[in-house]
Amino acid sequence: MVLLHGRLRVGIYEGRELWSSDRSLRERCVQSCLSSLVIDPYVTVRLGLKRIVKTATIQNTDTPEWGLDESYDLANDVSKLVVHVKANSSAMCIRLSPHKSLGYIKVDAEELVAGKALSGWLPLQGRTRLSREKNRGQLRLLIKFTPLADLQVNDPHVMPCYWPVRHGCRVTLYQDAHTPKGSLAPSAFESQGLAVPETVSAWTDIYQAISDARHVIYIMGWSVWVDVVMIREGDQAVAMPLGQLLLKKADEGVRVNLLVWDEVLSTDLPFFHSTGLMDTKDEQLRDFFKNTKVNTAIVPRVADDTAKNSIAGASVSGLFTHHSKAVVVDADADGTKRRLVAFVGGLDLTYGRYDTPSHDLFQTLRTTHSEDFHNACFNVTKENGPREPWHDIHCRLDGGIARDVAEYIEERWRGQASQKLQDALVDLDDAAVYVPGSFSTKDKNTWSAQMFRSCDERSAHMNVERGGLVTKKGRLIDKSIQRAYVHHIRRAQRFIYIENQYFLGSSHEWVHDRHKDAQHLVPLELVLKIEDKIRRKERFAVYVTIPLWSEGPAADKATQEVIFWQYRTIEMMYSRVHEALKEAGSTAKATDYLNFFCLGNREAVAPGGDSNVVEGEGAASTPDEVLLAKTRRHQIYVHSKMMIVDDEVILLGSANVNERSMNGARDTEAAVGAYQPHHMLKRTDEGELDGHTAQVYPNGDVAAFRKSLWIEHTSVMPDVFRDPASLACVHRMRELGEEGWQEFVGEEVVTMKHHLMLYPYVLEEDGEVEPRIKYFPDTQGTIKGDDSILLPNLLTA
């Protein structure tokens, strides 16, 4: 076994004599009996469990032409690469052959690492010694591996990619849906020499941008709730629900297009009503805008003719979602023309998302959340609570990047909106109306930004001439979000900070329970970066903040399986870091390099009782309400989808760190990568750090945002936070996390000083990971999780 860590170029061009060549006795008998026998060949390329290529099936020929030439990021411990030619045949007898195999080409991974490339016409071989001696046809291909050391990863521009980097942009970063004035600690900004913003509120800015639009409003979402009130402080008296606002803008002549996921299990028929499994309010949205000027395309994930059968096709709609969250509107450019502005991130415009950095449990039940109560983790009511606190991250994009976001929505619209809605798109390239919106690149606070997505052509019309696309079964796929994560992890020098709703993957490298359904590379790339830094004797730190458990009852089968996959992922990561330290002869701990956190809140009852909770008649009635009225605690649900690298680059959007989001052919996603060219790490031409730590750290908005998040979570700003890679910073974060955990689980109910908690795993001396306690607090859900034999891995991975 050797590690293939880098990029693999695969060319599968054409085949010849795949069936008419020298075959086995059985196959020759079939040939003589069925003169009209034809085959439908296709090719797969595998590295161990990981299938990286599956070509289109070419019908009725043994001289197929595929013309595939693509590149793939790799991080695989394997012994061989296997190119396998198979056949979907119109002659049933072919199916008697093992795996419908026509032949193989195998190459040792060691030869690829040594620089060997396969090119030209190569003969296919069979499984047995006798079959290997026969002529089984040839395949014209190209296989070439480029190790990471030879790749150009120093540039923040992700290549190849469907969209290029757009320079001269402006980016506004938001933490949580609403950040009241004064709630962001000024020290985070002052330490970077930046002005302290008066207020930075995602939903206020989105509402205002929609209100100010004159020509176009595009909204793409997993869920859009027409009754959501986006402004709840100050100007709330004049703020109308989102649905009413969109009706008003459409009546003013603004083109309003909504592209929203249709959950197939939700229905609103006269004889049957169902909110579906996720209660996305899609049926309410459909009914609300029916016969209005608002254009609504409520669409499911759909299969195509490449599905194996009708069951496999139906599973696409049943298992996967449209998960992107984006808003595009026109805004004033110069008083005469308009420019585009986009909002992208993790926040859906729906119920339960409105929250502030304080993440209240009970205090807002009668006020801010009286008409917007949400708790999917426990069986509680809005009369008694607690509500489920919600932490999220979003951004506003001005400049050329906003046009790229709009183009993604347009391609999705053309791919799935009904025929009668195809003319609803606005010409956003009309120079008489719109200006590109770029700003001066000389401004020290200017941004460069790049658009990424997870999507395939079943959900969008894509331009095959553009770069960055791969194929599966001949179907175009854009998985640039995973490529962006991999690229920026590979170029990281000092630290990585991740907040994400899920954290599971790299299942082909797990210590136990390896499987093929969650093989994206993000967790493994993080570990490989740490291993490299250990060998170099350099400091590096990875911080990951995730929910205490994924949303839903903690003991629920689906929740437990997600937690189980998460446990297997983190077990693999710590095991590899532990082994790397042993091999280096280091006395350091794996937690000096890699740490996992979660967020929680607890509210003690004020003297005189809690006026926000019903007492006497109507008091706590469900078992969960009785229990939580005593413990007064709840996890803060981390819904963020963000990675910060070295305080210079930020990736954020709708994509989770799981296979659903990273695969490209499962959930559809949107993300953006952004950095400030005048606030980057100082590097040598080789990409190494140039100067001492204090000199090289960036001094821009990304650094300030990371510190602002840490202040929200910890309520402090010690000097060690300036250098997240330092051991002192790691130890301080762990101390704060331990303090938070003790306050959260303690017998005495106290108002927590801060929200950060160590995730309840314990790393043993031998590198094994064990749960700190058996069950999540106030639940019967195990911290280790459990593999369900009933649920498909595709659903939970």
Image (cartoon, rainbow, N blue to C red):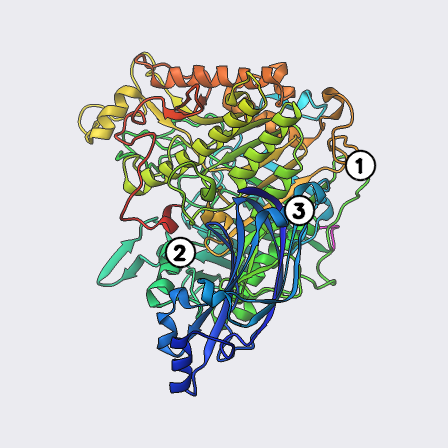
Amino acid type for the residue under numbered disc 2: Leu
Magenta includes 547?
Answer: no
Displayed quadrant of residue 570: top left
Q: Are marks 2 and 3 in contact (CB under 8 Å)?
A: no
The residue that disc 1 covers is: 685
Point out residue 95 in the picture as x, y percentages from the top left corner.
37, 71
Q: How many marks?
A: 3
The residue that disc 3 covers is: 114
Residue at 58 percent across and 30 percent down: it is 531
Displayed quadrant of residue 94: bottom left
Amino acid type for the residue under numbered disc 1: Asp
Q: Is residue 397 visible?
A: yes
- The span from disc 1 to disc 3 (Cα, nearest Å) is 25 Å
The mark found on residue 285 in the picture is: 2
Residue at 68 percent across and 33 percent down: it is 648
Q: Is residue 354 left or right of residue 374?
A: right
Q: Residues within 10 Å of mark 3 (few under 14, many from 20)?
A: few
Of residue 352 and residue 161, the one placed in the foreground of this image is 161
> What predominant SS class does the magenta segment belong to?
loop
Of residue 645 and residue 189, the one placed in the foreground of this image is 645
Point out residue 717 in the picture as x, y percentages from the top left corner.
59, 17
Q: Secondary structure at mark 3?
A: loop
